[in-house]
Image (cartoon, helix red, strand yellow):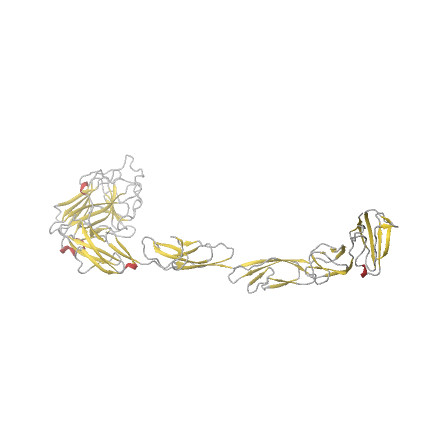
């Protein structure tokens, strides 16, 4: 890169400024480009005759220059770096231009074509930092003049000045240019660069990328209405045939010679044989390619890149079908877990759409590289070009699988004294992780407490079951009571038990209904059947009241069931304990009288003595 940095003190001179201007047409390859070399640090001195200043390897003082990418080290009022906005990059020429206006750079340019229009250009920068405060009365802006002389240095061909380039708070490059036309037989020119002002505070500058190149008509290319930039064709529509039409704007050339060129990468160009007209037809194009046209004012100049110009590249792009999206993996979760998003990756400049089926199906979501399913299933991602309506890619399936978890219910079990208990998950074919450290489907325990087991499937889904193992309640019969035809077995202590009157059929209720009179055995056991106790008892059905009114219903106090107990005695008492009647239980009857006199309505008590059993006591009502 050639950066030319000049430190000078100038006042503004605006002469010839109107002569500056860029080539408005197409441009050829550079025939001259001064970039002052690449690399870091200081470079070597310029060739003899280019400048009269002394070479140094530091920030130059008056009448000195350096070639470097380093600036503003000793002179802190300058900017401390160069922005990378020129064409080349690397080292640059830095010149402190002295106190009087005049020429500070001169070089010969050779290889020009005769009767050809050229553009000269260069980048300039005012390297004085406007925020440094080094110029208390204000800095002098930079002003530079360019001149093009013939090779004899006697005829001025063109000149132009930049006018004022003010200082700035941040470093900024600005490109300037002028155009001129070589004469017949003219192959060399001389470039001279001057400061346009005398010295003063500020007015420090830099120059980079001094370039000479041919300037021709601005030539545009179009086909089917697409101009200059190119066209895009879907792969499914290829191969195609296209006719390219070149149209120069006649701003420079009086006559035109053409040569079409093509390139696979837009950089390496080759001539297309026979393609020398303003129109060119491409036959059966099936892959992307670049095209441009070289234009010269004369056929003689057409084969010399330095004497001709080029149109902008026209790109015919055969847009390939997007790559199939790449899945970032199926998703496997357990029932009850949050369903995760599914995602794909693909190239840039594509849109990803999600569908419910491999072909057709419902569009679930547009333009997203991820999708949030609401349920298990298979979902399909398709890529399409973001800017063109071309065929989409094949669809990529992604599965979301929700695996079942083992269904378990907690249990509470009773442990018999001095015995063991089997805790069983009742599910086979899984992995088992017990709180005891065991790993079988079931385990044996001999102590009460809380036990847990985690049951894990092959898909790593699990559930936990809790076993509450408690000591059994001690079964003991406190009493058995007959209440008319109902039998009530009362336990001697609290707990949860089962009851039976035949030792076979057990129930959780201790009340038995509609039990006929007779001799029975009461059974009682804990829920684990660790201990069963029993008690034999007579069941006598005693009426709750009598009404001796002759209607044939409860006219007397009689007992059912005493025929099972031939050795029995019944006694009737009033409320004061007076014995009213007694006798053998078999065929015993009392009609509510005493010594032939009907007793009043009231409650009366009975004692029933049966050999081998405790006396049964109770009361009944006499109704009148």
Residue 418, above or below 214 = below
Residue 100, above or below 456 = above
Q: Nearer the viewer, residue 43 or 403?
A: 403
Query: Which of the 4 image quadrants contains residue 240?
Result: bottom left
Query: Which of the 4 image quadrants contains residue 166?
Result: top left
Q: Nearer the viewer, residue 515 or 433?
A: 515
Q: Nearer the viewer, residue 6 or 323?
A: 323
Residue 252, above or below 398 = above
Return the x and y of residue 405 as percentages of the image width and height: 53, 59
Query: Which of the 4 image quadrants contains residue 345?
Result: bottom left
Count the numbered circles shown: 0
Return the x and y of residue 397 as percentages of the image width and height: 41, 60
**Left-right relation of 382 to 214:** right
Outermost residue, right side: 595
Return the x and y of residue 391 as percentages of the image width and height: 33, 57
Q: Nearer the viewer, residue 464 or 183?
A: 464
Q: Is residue 347 visible?
A: no
Outermost residue, front side: 551
Outermost residue, top side: 137
Return the x and y of residue 204 as percentages of the image width and height: 26, 41
Q: Is residue 85 visible?
A: yes
**Left-right relation of 56 to 405:** left
């Amino acid at each position: 890169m050639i950066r030319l940095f000049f430190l000078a003190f100038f006042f503004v001179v605006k002469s010839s400024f109107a002569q500056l201007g860029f080539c408005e047409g197409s441009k050829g390859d550079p025939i001259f480009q001064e970039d002052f070399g690449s690399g870091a640090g200081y470079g070597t001195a310029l060739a003899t005759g280019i400048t009269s200043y002394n070479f140094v390897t530091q920030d130059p003082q008056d009448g000195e220059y350096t070639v470097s990418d380093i600036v503003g080290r000793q002179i802190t009022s300058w900017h401390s770096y160069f922005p990378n906005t020129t064409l080349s990059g690397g080292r640059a020429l830095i010149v402190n231009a002295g106190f009087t206006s005049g020429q500070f750079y001169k070089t010969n340019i050779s290889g020009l074509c005769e009767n050809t229009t050229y553009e000269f250009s260069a980048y300039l920068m005012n390297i004085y930092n406007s925020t440094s405060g080094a110029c208390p009365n204000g800095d002098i802006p930079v002003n530079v003049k360019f001149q093009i002389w013939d090779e004899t240095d006697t005829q001025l061909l063109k000149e132009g000045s930049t006018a004022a380039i003010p200082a700035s708070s941040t470093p900024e490059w600005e490109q300037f240019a002028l155009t001129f036309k070589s004469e017949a037989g003219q192959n060399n020119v001389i470039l001279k660069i001057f400061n346009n002002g005398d010295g003063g505070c500020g007015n420090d500058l830099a120059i980079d990328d001094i370039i000479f190149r041919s300037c021709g008509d601005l030539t545009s290319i179009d086909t089917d209405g697409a101009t200059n930039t190119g066209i895009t064709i879907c792969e499914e529509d290829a191969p195609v045939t296209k006719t390219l039409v070149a149209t120069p704007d006649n701003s420079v050339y009086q006559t035109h010679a053409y040569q079409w060129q093509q390139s696979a990468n837009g950089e390496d160009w080759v001539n297309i044989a026979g393609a020398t007209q303003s129109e060119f037809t491409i036959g059966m194009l099936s892959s992307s390619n670049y095209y441009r046209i070289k234009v010269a004012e004369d056929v003689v100049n057409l084969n010399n890149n330095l004497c001709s110009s080029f149109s902008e590249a026209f790109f015919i792009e055969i847009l390939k079908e997007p790559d199939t999206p790449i899945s970032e993996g199926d998703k496997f979760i357990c029932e009850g877990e949050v369903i995760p998003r599914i995602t794909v990756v693909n190239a840039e400049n594509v849109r990803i759409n999600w569908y419910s089926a491999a072909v057709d199906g419902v569009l679930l979501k547009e333009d997203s590289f991820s999708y949030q399913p609401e349920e298990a299933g298979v979902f399909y991602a398709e890529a399409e070009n973001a800017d063109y309506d071309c065929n989409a890619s094949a669809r990529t399936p992604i599965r979301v699988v929700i695996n079942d978890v083992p269904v378990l219910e907690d249990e509470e079990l009773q442990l018999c004294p001095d015995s063991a208990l089997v805790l069983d998950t009742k599910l086979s074919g899984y992995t088992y992780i017990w709180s005891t450290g065991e790993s079988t489907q079931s385990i044996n325990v001999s102590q009460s407490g809380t036990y847990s087991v985690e049951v894990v499937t092959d898909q790593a889904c699990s559930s936990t079951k809790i076993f509450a193992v408690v000591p059994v309640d001690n079964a003991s019969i406190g009493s058995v009571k007959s209440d008319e035809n109902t039998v009530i077995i009362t336990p001697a202590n609290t707990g949860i038990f089962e009851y039976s009157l035949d030792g076979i059929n057990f129930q959780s209720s201790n009340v038995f209904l509609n039990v006929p009179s007779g001799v029975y055995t009461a059974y009682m056991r804990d829920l684990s059947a660790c201990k069963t106790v029993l008690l034999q008892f007579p069941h006598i059905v005693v009426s709750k009241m009598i009404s001796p009114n002759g209607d044939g219903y409860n006219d007397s106090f009689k007992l059912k069931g005493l025929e099972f107990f031939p050795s029995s005695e019944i006694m009737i008492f009033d409320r004061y304990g007076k014995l009213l009647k007694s006798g053998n239980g078999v065929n015993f009857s009392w009609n509510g009288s005493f010594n032939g006199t009907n007793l009043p309505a009231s409650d009366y008590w009975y004692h029933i003595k049966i050999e081998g059993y405790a006396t049964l006591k109770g009361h009944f009502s006499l109704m009148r």
